Amino acid sequence: MRDFLADLQRLEEAGSGAIRAAAAIDRLEEVRVEILGRKARLTQLLRSVRDLPPEHRRTAGSEANRVKQRLQELLEQRTAELTADQKEEGPEVDLTLPGRPRWRGARHPCTLVTDEICGIFKELGFVRARGPEAETTWYNFTALNTPLDHPAADEQDTFYLDADVVLRTHTSPVQARVMEKTKPPVRIVVPGVVYRRDPFDASHAPAFDQIEGLAVDEGINFVEFKATIGYFVRRFFGEDTATRFRPSFFPFTEPSAELDVSCAICHGEGCSACKGTGWVEIMGAGMVDPAVFDNVGYDSERYTGYAFGMGVGRIAMLRYRIPDIRLLYEGDVRFLGQFARA
């Protein structure tokens, strides 16, 4: 019994001293846990009262409860003192400063344009397809009728990871992969990031978004191709937008063409954006070369098709009047925040 009461006295003295010494609310809470917590010595003494001889239990219990109540009162008193001190010192935050607006995330303009383009072609029966960004030279060049001695396959134009592995220079390799595994008819759009050894300037980037499209079936001709592209242009740029096909050359299409649309800024009259021509180039396209069909196992005498490719960044620049393509890829949240929807 003497040991029990002596322990209580030591706990009361130590606890009282620790409470008075606490200089902050956080420290006071730590002291409370130390002296009154579930694992504290005082709590253990209260539980051990039942183990004392019956004639000592009443006295021991009364004294233990007195010590506990005393410490609780000291804690409440010290809490009030510290709280009053904080109020006198003033708030930690300067309430006179203007509040910071909450930043809202937004989809990247290239993502917005990609989704819109894919949605338009979905209306025409096209589905999305994806493929690896690290490609073999077979899929990136040879299967698409581009020999490895072509300038496009030179190291100064292409990022090589190995002797026959490159970072894809276009999303066209996905077309070859899909055709190898799928029998006609095929209608796909292929969005993704591509890589080229281009300078990072106002109109070029070494890594950029691209969308390619492919349609293969029996009886597809250039008339259907022009109708499809014309429908896309009117849906995306507006009903009054004019189109122009210019003869060009691409190894994987024959005949090939580059597609121009009337400038949305000057409406064809000529301005700095279209270099005074009234037209803006948006894609390269053409009828799929029979050699590509032969490379993927299609009967080039039976099937025909068309393919097209466009840089999403260029389209986004036209849509949102963006003067420099670098703004799309620098990650400046001040620029990207403009595309947050209300």
Image: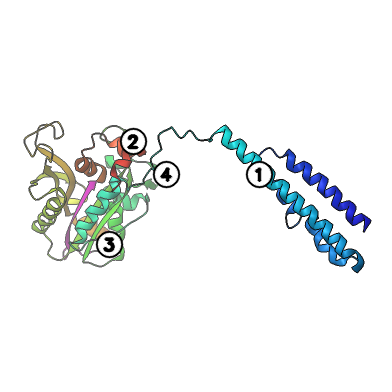
Real-space Cα separation, disc 4 to disc 1, in angstroms: 66 Å
The disc at residue 79 is 1
Name the amino acid type tagged 2.
Gln
Name the amino acid type tagged 1.
Thr
Q: Nearer the viewer, mark 2 or mark 1?
A: 1
In terms of depth relative to the viewer, which is nearer, 228 or 21? Answer: 21
Q: Which residue is mark 3?
A: 179
In terms of depth relative to the viewer, which is nearer, 118 or 24? Answer: 24
- Choose top left, top right, bottom left or bottom right for residue 99: top left
Give the class, few, some or many, for how many residues have Cα within 10 Å of label 1's Cα (few <14, many ≥20): some
In this rendering, the answer to whether 58 lies above or below 165 is below
Q: Answer with mark 2 or mark 3, whichever residue precedes in sequence.
A: 2
Real-space Cα separation, disc 3 to disc 4, in angstroms: 25 Å
User: Is 341 placed left or right of 56 in the picture?
Assistant: left
In this rendering, the answer to whether 201 lies above or below 26 is above
Name the amino acid type tagged 4.
Leu
User: Is 188 placed left or right of 57 in the picture?
Assistant: left
Q: Which residue is mark 2?
A: 156
Q: Answer with mark 2 or mark 1, whichever residue precedes in sequence.
A: 1
Real-space Cα separation, disc 2 to disc 3, in angstroms: 30 Å
Q: Label 4 near label 2: C-beta < 8 Å?
A: no
- Residue 10 visible to an observer of this rendering: yes
- Residue 145 visible to an observer of this rendering: no
Which residue is most to the right?
2
Q: Which residue is mark 4?
A: 161
Q: State the SS at label 1.
A: helix
